[in-house]
Image (cartoon, coloured by chain):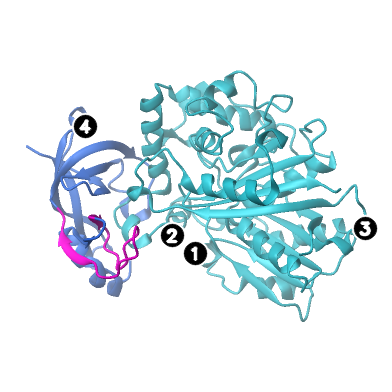
Chain colours: A blue, B cyan
Amino acid sequence: MSAPSYWREKVYRYRLIATYCENCNKKFYPPRPICLYCNNQNLKEVKLPSTGTLLEYVQVFQTFPEFSKLAPYYLGLIKLDDGTIIVAQLTDVERSELKEGIRVEAVFRKMYEDGEAGLIYYGIKFRPLA
Amino acid sequence: MSEVYITGIGYTQISEHWNKSIKQLALEASIKAIKDSNYLKPDVIIVSCSLSSFLQQQESLSNLLRDYLGFTKLPNIRIESGECSGAAALEIASSMIESGRYKNILVIGVEKPSDRLPQEYNAALSSMQDREYYYYNGITHASLFALIYKIYMKKYGLKQEDIASFAVHDHKMALNVDYAQYRFSISVDRILSSPIVAEPIRLFEIFPTSDGASAIMVSSKDQVENKDYAIKLDAITSASDINFTYRNDFLTFYSFHHAFEELRKRTKIAKSDINFLEIHDSYTIAAPLIIENLGFADKSEACRMLKEGEFEKDGSLPLNPSGGLKARGHPIGATPLYQVCEAVLQLRGKASNQVNNAEVGLVQSMNNVADQSYLILLRRYK
């Protein structure tokens, strides 16, 4: 991941910022400038709700070099409380807690780092709602 | 509009070719295809390769291959459309022949992932998705199929062994296919005891790391010398779908529906006319979803049809006589052209798992989770 790309993208990576189409009542995450359903170009930036429901999950064993020390980790298919669906990592979770339909919340977490002296990359993961 | 024919095919053994370069593989397939066409001279070279900029850090591949093939002046283009690059290249070649501007076009597909470590290859594969989002969050190519796998099993009350059996089928077919990567049979137990890649997907349910090259000479009708040998490229249709997370049904692949509807409109083909299918079963779960979404089986029925032998070469719908992506292999940019080469062999009556009286074959290709789809209909010369 290049440094310029990281700085450019961090707004939505840190804060679940999406774009919203008023005509279709649809939200897009990661944000995009044109509505996928009606081609409206006047989309507004909105903050997505930070809680949602787990629709399905998988455990990832083989992954990219940056995540190999983290593996195995869980990925969740999450329906946020406004209906927006996203895929994100699950954290602070035991296998016994993972079930279709559990409530989850967004948390700010380290994703990976570029070696000892390189950039540390942060983002959003989800954990079961206490 | 000129009709389009396949007048020559060539391909390499699919393997991990440690001692050959991406250029050597592409040249080997190209020379075979040119020879197979009885030395037709191409007017244009189109190269399909998806990952050379990642894996070999090599761009301008089409001009490089043109040079190494010894064609000093030919126009050349490189096409990249993820896993269906080869189908996209063939569609462009086909349109260029239809336009009447060119007579013969050599389409070359190649990929050489064994130049890199498995983790690096995994990273390269992720570049076929929105990398700034997927890669950053550790969402691998396999993990989306893993999600769909679980949703499919739950919805239809199926077991993993029902779905993993599609890999058994592919391996059984590949036993006879001399160019296939994995020519041995495998049991469901062995598959389900292989390492987990993205739960529930096991290593032996996934396409292998495959190096290979395949080439096809595409020609206008007046170039056809041998009518028993040339195969008609009847139609290529394509469609795409919105990103996975925006779909209202994760098990419905609209890109197939649209591509098949377009194919039906253009060729008046009925499903019962199709004698065999070559599909893009990158993961075992892809196979039932492709068959069902194309309408060759009712929802949830593909696993039952497999069990009942309907996909055998003498069954009602012979499936992947080449061994499919699992056992023939999946050299990304070359895969759709390997699928077409297999269909050509079938229609010439020269295939290893020959389907009796094959007249019409359908090749299906896709990128990621059916984000893009291609259908290629091939027929015997008439």
Q: Residue at x 87, y 65 (%)?
A: B40
- In this rendering, which labeled residue sits more in front, label 3 or label 2? 3
Is B195 rendered above or below residue B79?
above
**Label 4–label 1 contact, CB within 8 A:** no
Residue B225 is tagged as 3
Looking at the picture, which amino acid does disc 1 mark?
Answer: Phe
Q: Is residue A32 left or right of residue B290?
A: left
Q: For residue B362, say whether it is visible.
A: yes
Give the amino acid type for the residue marked by disc 3 in the picture.
Glu
Q: What residue type is labelled 2?
A: Ser
Segment colored magenta:
A25-48
Closer to the camera in the image, B289 or B32: B289
Number of the label disc, if any, that sits on residue B292? none
Same chain for mark 4 and mark 1? The answer is no
Q: Are marks 2 and 1 in contact (CB under 8 Å)?
A: yes
Residue picked out by circle 4? A98
Q: Which of the numbered marks, if any, corresponds to residue B54?
A: 1
Badge 3 local density, few (<14 within 10 Å), some, or many (20+)? few
Question: Closest to the observer: B14 or A18?
Answer: A18
Q: Quadrant of residue B272?
A: top right
